[in-house]
Amino acid sequence: TGRILLAQRPEGKQLAGLWEFPGGKIDPGETPEAALVRELAEELSITVKEEELKPLTFASFTYPDFHLLMPLYGCESWTGTILPREGQAIAWVEPARLRDYPAPPADLPLFDWLREQAFAER
């Protein structure tokens, strides 16, 4: 549908209340794709196959206490119904409206990239 799934960081977590792409940290020995498959199952109760993940772009951002390298993947096919397991709100967002959602600074260039891609496809 061209919409992007965002999840709001739950209370009690760093950057609580901000909106971000579902996902999480890579465990030792894990590929980025395997980590995303695991995180989507843990956070949203869905099953995604690694081959369904389409690498799109990445963000590189330095926070005060660490550097984040965040790959962004697209996924249009999964099994199960999206059910947030961590109490987080979710929203399906049109690319042009992504900046309406307060987000961590590392996500903002990705929001802009997705908006530009959506306009380029028109």
Image (cartoon, rainbow, N blue to C red):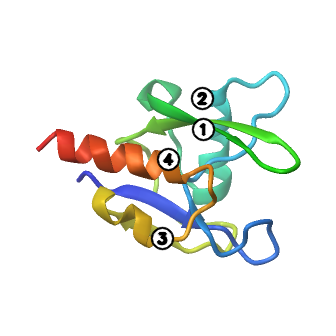
Q: To which quarter of the image does residue 14 belong?
A: bottom right
Q: Nearer the viewer, mark 3 or mark 4?
A: 4
- Residue under label 3, please give it: 101
- Residue under label 2, please give it: 33
Rendering coords of residue 27 (x, y %): 81, 33
For marks 1 and 3, give the CA distance.
24 Å
Q: Amino acid at mark 1?
A: Val
Q: Nearer the viewer, mark 1 or mark 4?
A: 4
Q: Residues within 10 Å of mark 3 (few under 14, many from 20)?
A: some
For marks 1 and 4, give the CA distance.
23 Å
> If you read the primary sequence from the N terminus, does the residue marked by circle 4 or circle 2 appear first?
2
Q: Residues within 10 Å of mark 2 (few under 14, many from 20)?
A: many
Residue at the limit of the structure toward the right, as seen here: 65
In the image, residue 81 above or below residue 29: below
- Residue under label 4, please give it: 109
Q: Nearer the viewer, mark 2 or mark 3?
A: 3
Rendering coords of residue 96 (x, y %): 29, 60
> If you read the primary sequence from the N terminus, does the residue marked by circle 2 or circle 3 appear first?
2
Q: Amino acid at mark 4?
A: Pro
SS under mark 2:
helix
Left or right: residue 33 versus residue 51 is right
Q: Nearer the viewer, mark 1 or mark 3?
A: 3
For marks 4 and 2, give the CA distance.
21 Å
Left or right: residue 80 versus residue 35 is left
For marks 1 and 2, give the CA distance.
6 Å
> If you read the primary sequence from the N terminus, does the residue marked by circle 1 or circle 3 appear first?
1
